[in-house]
Amino acid sequence: MMSCKPFSVRAAAASTPVGIGVRPTLLMVAVHLAVVGSALLPTPVVHAQAAAHSVVQAQVVWQTRSYDIPSGPLGPVLMRFASESGVLLAATPRLVEGKYSPGVRGSFNVQAALDALLVGTGLTAERNAQGQYALQVAKEDDVITLTPVTVTANQLGGVTEGTGTYTPGAIATATRLVLTPRETPQSISVVTRQEMDDFALTSIDKVMEHTPGVSIVTYDSERTVYFARGFAINNFQYDGIPMERDSGYSAGNTLSDMAIYDRVEVLKGATGLLTGSGDPGATINLIRKKPTHEFQGHVSVGTGTWNNYRTEVDVSGPLNAEGTVRGRAVAAYQDRESHMDGYRRKTPVFYGILETDLSPGTLLTIGADYQDNKPTRSTWGGIPIYDTEGNFNKRSRSFNNGAKWSGWEQYTRTAFATLEHYFDNDWVAKLQLNHQVNGYDAPLGAVGGGNPDPTDGSGTSMWVGRYVGKTRANAADFYASGPFDLFGRKHELVLGGSISNRRWTNKGDGPNIGYPTSVGNFYEWNGNVPQPNWNDPAAWHGENDETTREKGVYSTARWNLRDDLKLITGVRLSSYKRESMKESGVAVPYLGLVYDLNDTYSAYGSYTGIFKPQNNRDESGSTLDPLEGINMELGLKGTFFGGRLNASAAIFQLEQDNFAEATGGLTPDGGTAYRAISGVKSEGYELELSGQLNAYWNVHASYSHGVSRHQVKWSNCSGHPVKPS
């Protein structure tokens, strides 16, 4: 399978960024920035010791030293800077509240480093005669940023809403460490809230069309499959919690509406450190919108071709006078028709989230979301490519192979809760709980079998079946993250564990006895055929009931080997159980190295792994060993304009072993037999540029190329569900 995306450039005039308030809890820890009392400036007590201290401070102020402080909430960033530089820095909590720093990397004196740390905050650091600093609101002429912006960050990374740019400030999808794209030793593409708004990317399909290195295969009107680096993307995350998708029995993942999301992150390559089992191509992480500390909201109404109507309402802000309780509610409704005859889909979406500060360092979040996708006259698979004479079977663009009663309704229901606590030593502990239901109700009928005779249209038949099912998934993830000192340097560590339980139930029904599946004249097809009696006891009926349990523990460490060299090591120990399949103690490695060539560019290399148990069996009836995949990647990343513009270039190679290939034989119970083959390989390169060129223009440009070898042809190109055994 070729995973190759053509060159694409998208640019748009940047809208004026909107400042948003943020939760104060994390920043409350940052009150003590080497401050005496709570005053803006220390009390000037004159004595010999103070005078000596002033001399030392003056020396510190003008010394040049190397810094490597990542982006993050302004309070903790300034605390770290004050500790490393040795200067006294005074600020009030309200002044730093809700602001985000791009960090600083390289050799600077104190003033230059502070200027870099305060880019985009609307603040300046003023030095007094004793060499001490106090934060002040900058005068308009003193603001050294492309456009003033106030954003927030959390353990999921930097919020993109309100930044006005096409690049993220920080991400955490790869390792749970909150790192900038340049600090992450893997390719990652992010479609921000600004890009979604500028290009009306209201669905995940549209977002994937804008994502570098991702190609889309369309099964039918309700099902798409995304591919990256030669492999299908079945690994989805919602706020970092994994949810595996079954593309054959689609249940809402690829129909997600973007009204409730802040950004979509696509991490390329194997991602088993956090996802556990899965495929090696990529992981899609959808990050939900969060409540804001200041009131904001919008209402939008839109219309488009083919009777496409959409309404969206989004309201957010504090729910009490102190701002310690905040909420957000989003509702969207889309009703659209299509160029295909008789097709229509209605999509209602609802989302609500509450945040409350239980203490200055403890945040509780609860929320829920809901989406329905209600289509009429859904297609199912494709139509015959050739007629009986071998000629291309050309049909009009409006041709719909679905019966008038055919429909594939899909829905999602999610409830989630998060509890996180920030300790005084910069450590964070986070517990996340997630309950999700993905379901479908699909009475389906469509022309697809055989080849039409060009003279009279005879020779084709219908695919007919009804499938009703759902997946109930419960997941919990807990981890602690923070710095530690070793060999005179400060490093970062993540320790965590997760557990999940997914139960899939499905009921399939065939057409009633005597139902005419043959089609008279293919060229006169209009979908006007009767619906079968799905309850006919003499017809085919089947059921599935599968439960998958996964658990694992993981650890990640970011080793500060030198100021310009960082090593990231990680491992996950996973256990997996589904019906007769059981795997335990599976080790999934993660290894990354990032070397700063200078203040702008970094070179990196990474090696990551993933595994996926399978239920395919050989001719003796034995289940094949789990699929095992690895990703090896080398690249160069650069960041410009204080992190507002990011560039990357990468070469990669993915390998997968134990890939199931049909042998042509049968299993003891009559099923299709497979054998495991090794060396399924994909390799290529990717180039990407994303972010803000200046205060008025954003750009997202990319080029990707990939070649896959030893791929096995699909035995069922339409991806139809098959009858359960």
Image (cartoon, rainbow, N blue to C red):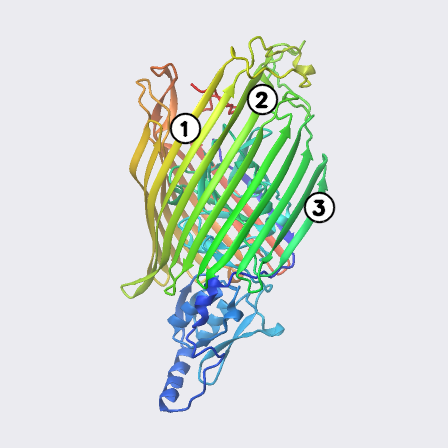
Residue that protrudes farthest toward the left in the picture: 487
**Dot 3: within a 10 Å radius of its alpha carbon, few (fewer than 14), some, or many (20 or more) residues?**
few
The disc labelled 3 sits on which kind of residue? Val
The disc labelled 1 sits on which kind of residue? Glu
**Residue 199 location in percent, x, y?**
64, 46
State whether residue 616 appears in this view: yes
- In which quadrant of the rendered view does residue 20 lie? bottom right
Callout 3 secondary element: strand
Q: Quadrant of the C terminus?
A: top left
Q: Residue at x 70, y 39 (%)?
A: 309
| 3D distance between C-alphas at marks 3 and 1 | 42 Å
- State which tag comes first along the sequence, 1 or 2: 2
State whether residue 261 appears in this view: no
> Which mark is in front, 3 or 1?
1
Q: Which residue is mark 3?
A: 301
**Residue 91 location in percent, x, y?**
49, 74
Is 702 on the left-hand or right-hand side of 553?
right
**Residue 652 location in percent, x, y?**
42, 42
- State which tag comes first along the sequence, 3 or 1: 3
**Dot 2: within a 10 Å radius of its alpha carbon, few (fewer than 14), some, or many (20 or more) residues?**
many
- State which tag comes first along the sequence, 3 or 2: 3
Front one among 210 and 605: 210
| 3D distance between C-alphas at marks 3 and 2 | 33 Å
Q: Residue at x 67, y 9 (%)?
A: 456
Front one among 258 and 417: 417
Callout 1 secondary element: strand
The disc labelled 2 sits on which kind of residue? Leu
| 3D distance between C-alphas at marks 1 and 2 | 23 Å
Which disc, if any, is residue 444?
Answer: 2
Q: Which residue is mark 1?
A: 546
- In which quadrant of the rendered view does residue 42 lie? bottom left
**Dot 1: within a 10 Å radius of its alpha carbon, few (fewer than 14), some, or many (20 or more) residues?**
few
